[in-house]
Each structure stands twice: as structure tokens, then as C-alpha cells.
Image (cartoon, rainbow, N blue to C red):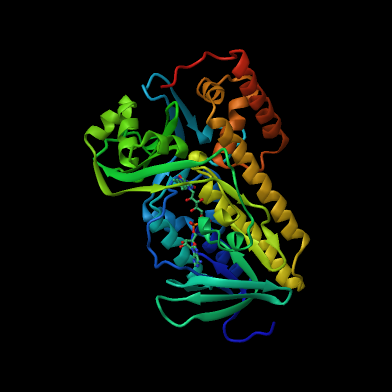
């Protein structure tokens, strides 16, 4: 394809964290990137707790000064809490044996995503907001997209490569019939923002994410600032339907079963609406094909329990952009680096999904919340919770032993059985 108006090295569908990150890396490699985003930023998005291993990507992209200036809440750890408060396990990222990233941020996504998209534009990418991609084609010669802008005439753009960063809209994956839902994992999330909740004075504890694990559900408690907390409940979608409760009633009923949270909410006011989302975990059967790469949630979406979404979005976008950039330089449509990207992304999603699947079982919670220091097994779990995907064999064998103990715990108590209500 020749260079002509409306022709780019890469067109990125979606300007969330994955899309902005892909654009930033492509621009740094000297490529002409076009980001097409259907919304006008800033816009609300859920997914507010970031992982420590996101920080090296922020540093590499020169984002740290802007993130500090934005004043996002610093996050140094995570706490898993039983509903009656009888047991609380505190994880401090800086203390993990296999992690060297001690902190991350809790962010209001409207502000965070806007900051990333503006940074991408400043770095050289062309950003068009309010532009929905309606159609696409890819063939060995390149990619074509057709957009619509608020009732305006359709526009057509062409590129050497398309990068799908459309999030759970899963634009190209749905069109190509590639989506595979984790059938046993159909969840429903109910959430909102609250003010007036007192937080601990201690700066290093104040920003911890709290996970309240109920028998059949869990809450996230994410302090976005000293004034504002994001609170959400994740339940089984089928059970919610059977209960005949509205999402709000289900949320309130769960709060009543969680004394510590009930007390904290007694003095809180909700700001904004209660929102809901059916967060079915899925992945596409393919992430790359000639001249097309899927990144972030448009590759696969995972249950939010371990806050892996934004990190995986930025990690996959970085790896995909590097592979695409190399493919453009060598004039090829599908390269070994793209295939490597496919394998690595599948492995990242697999590693998190294994943790997620176990999280919903009682034996896993019993071992997670009563950690045994032996062989530094809990440190391997902390590594994954921090986003350390390069921990190598030292982390992998420990995780295998940990999951083996989880299976053992189901039959013979390795640690005390817990009553989780
Ligand atoms: C209930 C819940 C809680 C979560 N909590 C966390 C958390 O605490 N931490 C965390 O890291 N992650 C969390 N996540 C996951 C996180 O939200 C996502 O993984 C993350 O936003 C993925 O980024 P992305 O850039 O791939 O997609 P998105 O952020 O969704 O961005 C995709 C963009 O593409 C645009 N788009 C879509 N279709 C088109 C189109 N046709 N044309 C143009 N533009 C289009 C959309 O408008 C959107 O802006 C949570 C998710 C859910 C559902």
C-alpha cells in the first residue's frame, strides 16, 4: 500500500490503556499511528486498581511525572478480609522475595485514561475521538477501517497493520467469531463511588486495596483518594438471577453480611449511580493474524479479582507494538515476533486465570489467608499479584506446589478450615 492521505503505519481501534500504550510505543519507533476512539475523553471506566509491575512501563513511557502530578493514591499492598473481620491477610508488595516493584496507583480511570491518550497524542500519534469504527477488512496488502462520527459521513482509513484495542467490545474478535467464554465463570459486578469513609492515617496502608471475601461473592474496596472510595461486589450471575433481587438489593444484602464494611458505609454517601456489568471472562481463539493484532481486553478479559486488566492491557500493547513495528520494518505480514506475542499473551492470561479459578474455591482462600512461610510459597503468590510475569522457575515451581497444596487442602486440612459466611 502506498503512502496517501488517510494511510498510516498502524490503525489502533480504541483509546483505552491498551490503545494509548500501543500508540506510544509505535510513535517511539517512528511509526505513524492513528487511534480511533468512539467516546470523547474523559469518560467513566471501571478498572481502578493498578499493579506494581505497571510502573516499569510507566517509567519507560515517561509517564511517571504526570502520574505523580495527577495525585493518584499510592498503593503499597492488598488485604484479604473475612466478612466478620475475624481474619485479615496483608500483602505488602515491597516485601515479596520475587518482586522488586513496591508500589502502584489507584486511579480514577476517567483521569488516567485521558492522561494516557493525551500523552500518546503529544508523542506523535494522531488521535481522533468520537470516532466509532464500524467496519474493517484485512488482507495481505493491509488493513482498512470505516468509521462513523456522530452522524457525520463515514470515513475510510488504511494502514499496514490494524491493532484491535477495543476492550470488551472485542470488535474484530466478535466479527471473526473467535470469542470463547469461560463458561463456568459468568459473574456480575455491582459498583459505585462513595465519599465520607474514614481511611487509615498511615500513608502506606491508606491506599491498600481491600478484598472482602464472602462465601458466594466478594467486594473490592479501592481508596481512590482520601475522600473517595470505589466499592464493588462481584457475584455469580446465575445466583443473582435466581435470587430475584435487584442488583442494588443484592449489594445491600451483602453489605449487611460484612460487619466491617457495614460500619464503614454507615457514614458514607454514594456519589453517582450504582453501575452494573456482566463481566464474563473470555479470550479469543487467536490474537494475531496477518496484519492484525489484538491487545488488552480485545485479546482476552479476565475476572477483576487480581486487578490484572490494565497491566495486561499495557503489557500486551507494548509487546504487540514492538512486534508490529518490526514487521513493518521488514515488510512482512506475520512474523515470528507476532507468533511469540500470541504465545506469551496466552501464557499471561493462563497464569492469571489459574489464580482466578482457585480464588473462588474455599481451600485456596484457606491457604491464602493462613500463609505458611515454608519454601517462600506465599512470595510466589505475591509475585503474581504484583504482576511479576518474569519470575522464572523460582516462582513457577512454588506456584505448582501451592496449587498442589490447595488440592490437598480440599481433602486433608493442611491449615485450619475457615468458616466463611
Ligand atoms: C467490574 C470490573 C472491575 C475491574 N477492576 C479492575 C481493576 O481494579 N484493575 C484493573 O487493572 N483492571 C480492572 N478491570 C479490567 C479493566 O477495566 C480492563 O482490563 C482494562 O480497561 C482494559 O483496557 P483496554 O484498553 O484493553 O480496554 P478499555 O479500557 O475498555 O478501552 C477500550 C476502548 O475502546 C473503545 N472502543 C470500543 N469499540 C470501539 C470501536 N468500535 N471504535 C472505536 N473505539 C472503540 C472504547 O470506547 C474504549 O475506550 C475491571 C473490569 C471490570 C469489568
Q: Residue furthest bottom?
A: 4
Q: Return the x and y of residue 388 as percentages of the image width and height.
A: 61, 41
Residue 240 is drawn in which quadrant? top left
Taking depth in this image into account, of 284 and 238 the one nearest to the observer is 238
Left or right for 85, reference 290: left
Q: Quadrant of the C terminus?
A: top left
Point 68% across, 56% down: residue: 286
Q: Is residue 340 above or below residue 199?
A: below
Residue 390 is drawn in which quadrant? top right
Q: Return the x and y of residue 282 as percentages of the image width and height.
A: 58, 48
Point 52% across, 57% down: residue: 167
User: Can the viewer see residue 76?
Assistant: no
Left or right for 20, reference 207: right
Point 62% across, 15% down: residue: 411
Q: Return the x and y of residue 370 as percentages of the image width and height.
A: 52, 20
Q: Is residue 417 above or below residue 3?
A: above
User: Can the viewer see residue 168?
Assistant: yes
The total number of labels drawn is: 0
Taking depth in this image into account, of 167 and 78 the one nearest to the observer is 167
Q: Quadrant of the N terminus?
A: bottom right
Q: Is residue 379 above or below residue 150?
A: above
Q: Return the x and y of residue 279 as percentages of the image width and height.
A: 48, 46
Point 74% across, 54% down: residue: 340
Amino acid at each position: 500500500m502506498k503512502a496517501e492521505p488517510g494511510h498510516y503505519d498502524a490503525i489502533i481501534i480504541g483509546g483505552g490503556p491498551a490503545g494509548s500504550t500501543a500508540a506510544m510505543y509505535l510513535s517511539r519507533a517512528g511509526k505513524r499511528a492513528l487511534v480511533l476512539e468512539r467516546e470523547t475523553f474523559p469518560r467513566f471506566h471501571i478498572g481502578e486498581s493498578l499493579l506494581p509491575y505497571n510502573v516499569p512501563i510507566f517509567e519507560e513511557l515517561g509517564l511517571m511525572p504526570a502520574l505523580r502530578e495527577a495525585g493518584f493514591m499510592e498503593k503499597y499492598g492488598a488485604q484479604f478480609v473475612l466478612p466478620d473481620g475475624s481474619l485479615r491477610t496483608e500483602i505488602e508488595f515491597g516485601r515479596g522475595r520475587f518482586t522488586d516493584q513496591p508500589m502502584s496507583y489507584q486511579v480514577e480511570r476517567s483521569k488516567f485514561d485521558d492522561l494516557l491518550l493525551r500523552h500518546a497524542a503529544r508523542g506523535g500519534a494522531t488521535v481522533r475521538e468520537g470516532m466509532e469504527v464500524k467496519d474493517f477488512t484485512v488482507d495481505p496488502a493491509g488493513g482498512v477501517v470505516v468509521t462513523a462520527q456522530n452522524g457525520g459521513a463515514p470515513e475510510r482509513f488504511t494502514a499496514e497493520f490494524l491493532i484491535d484495542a477495543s476492550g470488551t467490545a472485542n470488535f474484530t474478535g466478535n466479527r471473526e467469531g473467535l470469542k470463547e467464554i469461560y463458561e463456568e465463570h459468568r459473574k456480575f459486578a455491582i459498583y459505585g463511588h462513595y465519599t465520607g469513609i474514614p481511611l487509615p492515617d498511615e500513608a502506606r496502608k491508606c491506599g491498600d486495596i481491600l478484598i472482602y471475601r464472602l462465601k458466594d461473592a466478594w467486594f473490592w474496596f479501592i481508596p481512590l483518594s482520601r475522600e473517595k472510595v470505589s466499592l464493588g461486589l462481584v457475584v455469580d450471575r446465575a445466583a443473582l438471577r435466581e435470587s430475584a433481587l435487584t442488583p442494588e438489593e443484592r449489594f445491600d444484602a451483602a453489605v449487611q453480611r460484612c460487619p466491617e464494611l457495614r460500619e464503614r458505609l454507615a457514614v458514607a454517601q454514594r456519589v453517582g449511580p450504582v453501575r452494573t456489568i456482566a463481566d464474563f471472562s473470555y479470550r479469543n481463539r487467536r490474537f494475531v493474524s496477518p496484519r492484525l493484532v489484538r491487545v488488552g481486553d480485545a485479546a482476552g478479559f479476565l475476572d477483576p479479582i487480581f486487578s490484572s486488566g490494565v497491566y495486561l492491557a499495557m503489557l500486551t500493547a507494548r509487546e504487540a507494538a514492538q512486534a508490529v513495528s518490526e514487521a513493518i520494518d521488514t515488510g512482512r505480514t506475520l512474523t515470528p515476533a507476532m507468533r511469540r506475542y500470541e504465545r506469551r499473551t496466552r501464557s499471561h492470561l493462563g497464569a492469571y486465570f489459574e489464580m482466578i479459578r482457585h480464588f473462588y474455591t474455599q481451600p485456596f482462600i484457606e491457604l491464602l489467608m493462613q500463609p505458611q512461610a515454608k519454601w517462600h510459597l506465599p512470595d510466589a503468590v505475591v509475585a503474581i499479584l504484583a504482576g511479576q510475569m518474569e519470575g522464572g522457575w523460582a516462582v513457577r515451581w512454588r506456584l505448582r506446589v501451592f496449587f498442589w497444596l490447595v488440592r490437598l487442602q480440599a481433602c486433608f486440612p493442611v491449615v485450619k478450615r475457615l468458616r466463611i459466611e
